Image: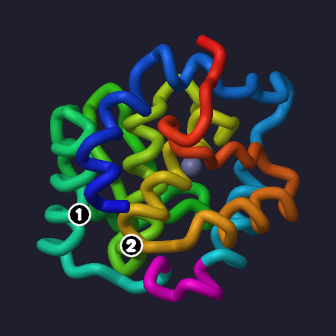
Amino acid sequence: MQAWFWCQARFVLGASFLNALPLPDADRDYRAALCRFEDDLFARYPDGHRILGEAEAHALIASVFTACGRAVPSLDLVDGFADPRIGGFADVEGNRIMIERGCLYRFLVLHESAHLLAPADHRHGPVFTYVLQMLYRTFIAVPEHAIRDLLLRHGLPCYTDLPQDVRIAA
Ligand SMILES: [Zn+2]
């Protein structure tokens, strides 16, 4: 999957691929369901809940964004957010990932990275979810079937096919 990602990430992030994904439910923010999905997924694949060292987190971010041909964002550890339920934030304008000190979970670094890679879909819709599941498969080695089953169970957009597996109408 890592080798696939290095070859395909730029194509996947291109407008022709992402624009062909199903449209989101316009009135809906999928955030709450997505949080429950992540809890369930990483209860089964605990590497996602592993806390990274700062250097490790920087290296992970560098691999993701280098493969995607995007500028590598900075990572700022902060004391917390106004909303205590939030542990991370993607500052799209500043190309910066902010994560609460003590919450440098592998999955959270990837989740905030997905926000920077798919900034238009800030309500956790199909484009965001597609990019996110690609990162979880590549960098946490979660199998596709586990992701698809849990996305379905939580009522989330569940498109997970890799581009070479299927023809998507442009
Ligand atoms: Zn988010």
**As rendered, which of 37 and 102 lies closer to the eye?**
37
Q: Quadrant of residue 101?
A: bottom left
Q: Is residue 46 magenta?
A: yes
Residue 16 locus on image (x, y percent)? 49, 15
Q: How many marks?
A: 2
Residue tagged 2: 106
Q: Residue at x 83, y 57 (%)?
A: 152
Q: Is residue 42 left or right of residue 15?
A: right
Magenta stretch in the rendered image = 42-48
Q: Residue at x 51, y 36 (%)?
A: 163
For the N terminus, the image quarter is bottom left
Residue tagged 1: 60
Q: Is residue 60 left or right of residue 44?
A: left
Is 57 drawn above or below residue 71 in the view shown? below
Q: Residue at x 61, y 45 (%)?
A: 161
Amino acid type, callout 2: Arg
Q: Is the Cβ of the residue at disc 2 closer than 8 Å to that at disc 1?
A: yes
Q: Residue at x 39, y 37 (%)?
A: 116
Q: Is residue 107 left or right of residue 96?
A: right
